[in-house]
Image (cartoon, helix red, strand yellow):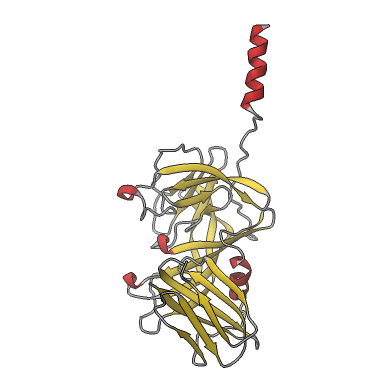
């Protein structure tokens, strides 16, 4: 009887027990990762690109079957005319082979020129484990070693998915690294998922509603980078950013260098002041949507 009492107490205080469902990364051609990548002045250029990752078709590499990862719809969102074009932005087309071992919860990439693939995700890792992955940045990691510092869950379209955090960088089951899910880009610290679109999971957006805007932009929404009729000042800006246009402004959006949406305003006038005193220092991108449907993009600095 005493053992039964202890068993009942354990059940009461232990709470509900459920197994963690594993969500593999979808491999259908309808799955799209919308990405933002900022080429920095450290690379000898200053511009931002928006593009899609998509898996289309299969390929056989070194005896293993892979899904072909493609870059599509590369769009130059912003370019500083005082600097040359970035040479390290990926071109449209095939960029590598992806395979995953769903039983062992591991994912691999084979980049062009490699003779063997490389492990990019291991969802069995525990806190304190390390993983050398081309998809996980190390810039803010101690001694540039990606150490798993926390494990929790994140809500993806109504379902909780396992999330691993390496230093400050997140990896999510069924989505991948929030910086560069396939490790293609040369400086993944300057890249980020704008959103992931999947027919089953729906949307995953680190910073909604960025997905709606950038997906439309990639789909060739009319845009221009010319701002001859628009004044944005002061630049650099310390607190209040002023915008004066000849025509009425319909919407204002401000993104950081990783495509995260900071400000989303609806306007009815041709002048606007924006208080940025609570925003961290750095490089930001301003997108203006005018009443006539034209869009203007430019960059400013907060210091």
Relative to 195, does residue 275 appear above or below in the rendering?
below
Q: Is residue 89 among the parts visible in the rendering?
A: no
Q: Nearer the viewer, residue 231 or 215?
A: 231
> Which residue is more in the foreground, 155 or 245?
245
The one of 25 and 5 positioned closer to us in this rendering? 5
| Rendered-image quadrant of the C terminus | bottom left
Q: Quadrant of the N terminus?
A: top right
Residue 154 picture location, percent across and down: 59, 48
Image x and y of residue 129, in percent: 41, 38
Above or below, 102 against 183 in this view is above
Residue 69 visible in the picture? yes
Q: Quadrant of residue 247?
A: bottom right
Query: Residue at image x 62%, y 88%?
Result: 248
Q: Which residue: 56% across, 81% down?
A: 288
Q: Give the image location of residue 268, x and y in percent.
A: 65, 84
- Going 58% across and 61% down the picture, which residue do you hit? 195
At x 41%, y 53%, the residue is 134
Of all residues, the one furthest to the top in this rendering is 1
Q: Residue lying at the far left in this picture: please name it.
A: 143
**Residue 73 position by quadrant:** bottom right
Task: Relative to 281, say whether 200 is above or below.
Answer: above
Callout count: 0
Locate residue 91, reporting x and y percent: 47, 71
């Amino acid at each position: 009887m005493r053992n039964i009492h202890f068993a009942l107490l354990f059940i009461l205080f232990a709470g509900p027990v459920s197994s963690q469902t594993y969500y593999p990364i979808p491999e259908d051609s309808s799955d799209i990762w919308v990405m933002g990548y900022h080429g920095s002045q450290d690379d000898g250029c200053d511009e931002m690109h928006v593009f899609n990752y998509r898996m289309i078709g299969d390929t056989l590499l070194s005896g293993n079957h892979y899904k072909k990862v493609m870059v599509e719809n590369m769009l130059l969102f912003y370019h500083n005319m005082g600097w040359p074009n970035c040479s390290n932005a990926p071109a449209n087309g095939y960029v590598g082979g992806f395979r995953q071992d769903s039983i062992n919860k591991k994912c691999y990439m084979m980049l062009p020129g490699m003779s063997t693939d490389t492990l990019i995700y291991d969802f069995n890792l525990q806190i304190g484990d390390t993983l050398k992955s081309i998809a996980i940045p190390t810039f803010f990691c101690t001694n540039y070693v990606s150490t798993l510092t926390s494990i929790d869950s994140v809500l993806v379209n109504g379902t909780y998915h396992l999330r691993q955090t390496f230093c400050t960088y997140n990896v999510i089951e069924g989505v991948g690294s929030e910086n560069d899910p396939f490790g293609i880009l040369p400086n993944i610290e300057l890249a980020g998922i704008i959103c992931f679109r999947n027919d089953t999971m729906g949307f995953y957006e680190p910073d909604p509603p960025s997905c709606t805007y950038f997906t439309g932009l990639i789909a060739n929404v009319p845009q221009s980078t010319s701002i001859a009729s628009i004044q944005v000042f002061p630049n650099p800006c310390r607190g209040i950013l002023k915008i004066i246009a000849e025509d009425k402004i319909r919407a204002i959006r401000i993104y950081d260098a990783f495509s995260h949406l900071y400000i989303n305003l609806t306007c009815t006038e041709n002048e606007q002041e924006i208080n940025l005193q609570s925003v961290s220092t750095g490089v930001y991108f301003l997108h203006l949507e005018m009443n006539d449907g034209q869009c203007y993009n430019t960059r400013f600095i907060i210091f």
